[in-house]
Image (cartoon, rainbow, N blue to C red):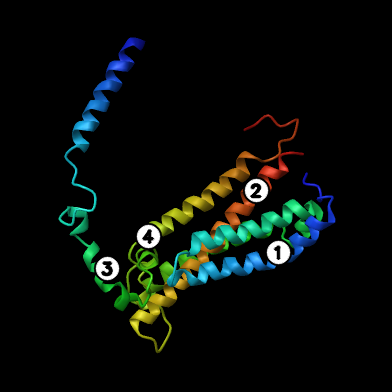
């Protein structure tokens, strides 16, 4: 069965190249991602939040929920390091 | 275990540098409104100052100045600050993480969002600093 890996990978690469060739160009002003809410963020962030920095306003106010999830991931990584790197007794055989 | 560095020059320079690094870290957190920066970058700079202290002054002195339990507490405290700023507007008529409904009297909605973003950035900075110092302590302890 190992001879099947290369053709399957080749088929997936061909599918992905075919799908990405029809994405819009970079920086296209008519692309759906640049037309939906981004113009309203750019126009209204200064009067809505009083913050000159647009990146901070979008990251912490308009999309604050994603930032909350990211912070939870960072703290969970730190706590997971504690569990993995705990000292073990010589007589203990669990975990 | 991390030994104290032998050279006296390194110890003196480290003791002089650590307050300035912490001041710069606080500046990067608070100044995220006006330029590049914000919570994540400032938190890493604050963690750098503690790790410099651990490397140069050895384990006994730096554990007395900044114990590992304090790093864990600050990390979880920062996350709690962020979550509470999200939950409090729910009791006062707004959505989750809607800073315009924070209960501070006499300010317009734009000012309330400004204050909300500042509180949230401080929480993120503390959480990132706690996580970085925590991981460093656990990795350095394992050398024993």
Q: Work out which residue is located at the far front of the displayed protein and give it.
A: B9
Is residue B79 shown to the viewer in this render?
no
Residue A18 located left or right of residue B78: left
The quarter in which the C terminus of chain A is drawn is top right
Q: Residues within 10 Å of mark 2 (few under 14, many from 20)?
A: some
Closest to the camera, between mark 1 and mark 4, is 1
Local secondary structure at mark 4: helix
Q: Identify the disc placed on residue B108.
A: none
Front in this rendered view, residue B6 or A65: B6
As measured in the structure, the alpha-carbon distance from the residue carrying label 3 to the one carrying label 4 is 19 Å
Q: Are marks 1 and 3 on the same chain?
A: no
Q: Which residue is mark 1?
A: B17
Q: Are marks 3 and 2 on the same chain?
A: no
Closest to the camera, between mark 1 and mark 3, is 1
Q: Residues within 10 Å of mark 3 (few under 14, many from 20)?
A: few
As measured in the structure, the alpha-carbon distance from the residue carrying label 2 to the one carrying label 1 is 20 Å
Q: Which residue is mark 3?
A: A42
Local secondary structure at mark 3: helix
Q: Identify the disc placed on residue B136.
A: 2
Residue drawn at (38%, 70%), measured in percent from left and top?
A53
Q: Residues within 10 Å of mark 1 (few under 14, many from 20)?
A: few
Residue A90 located left or right of residue A28: right
Q: Position of residue B46 (x, y in %)?
A: 61, 61
**Chain where mark 1 sits:** B
């Amino acid at each position: 069965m190992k001879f099947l890996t290369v053709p399957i990978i080749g088929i997936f690469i061909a599918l992905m190249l075919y799908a990405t060739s029809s994405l819009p160009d970079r920086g296209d002003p008519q692309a759906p991602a640049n037309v939906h809410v981004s113009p309203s963020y750019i126009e209204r962030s200064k009067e809505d939040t009083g913050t000159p920095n647009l990146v901070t306003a979008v990251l912490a106010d308009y999309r604050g929920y994603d930032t909350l999830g990211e912070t939870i991931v960072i703290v969970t990584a730190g706590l997971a390091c504690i569990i993995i790197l705990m000292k073990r007794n010589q007589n203990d055989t669990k975990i | 275990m991390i030994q104290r560095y032998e050279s006296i020059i390194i110890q003196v320079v480290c003791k002089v540098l650590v307050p300035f690094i912490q001041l710069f870290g606080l500046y990067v957190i608070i100044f995220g409104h006006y330029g590049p920066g914000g919570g994540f970058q400032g938190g890493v700079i604050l963690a750098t100052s503690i790790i410099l202290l651990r490397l140069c002054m050895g384990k006994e002195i730096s554990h007395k100045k900044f114990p590992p339990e304090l790093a864990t507490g600050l990390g979880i405290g920062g996350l709690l600050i962020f979550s509470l700023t999200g939950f409090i507007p729910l009791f006062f008529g707004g959505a989750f993480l809607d800073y315009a409904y924070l209960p501070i009297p006499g300010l317009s909605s734009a000012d309330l969002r400004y204050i909300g973003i500042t509180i949230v950035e401080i929480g993120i900075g503390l959480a990132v600093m706690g996580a970085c110092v925590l991981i460093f302590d656990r990795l350095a302890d394992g050398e024993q």
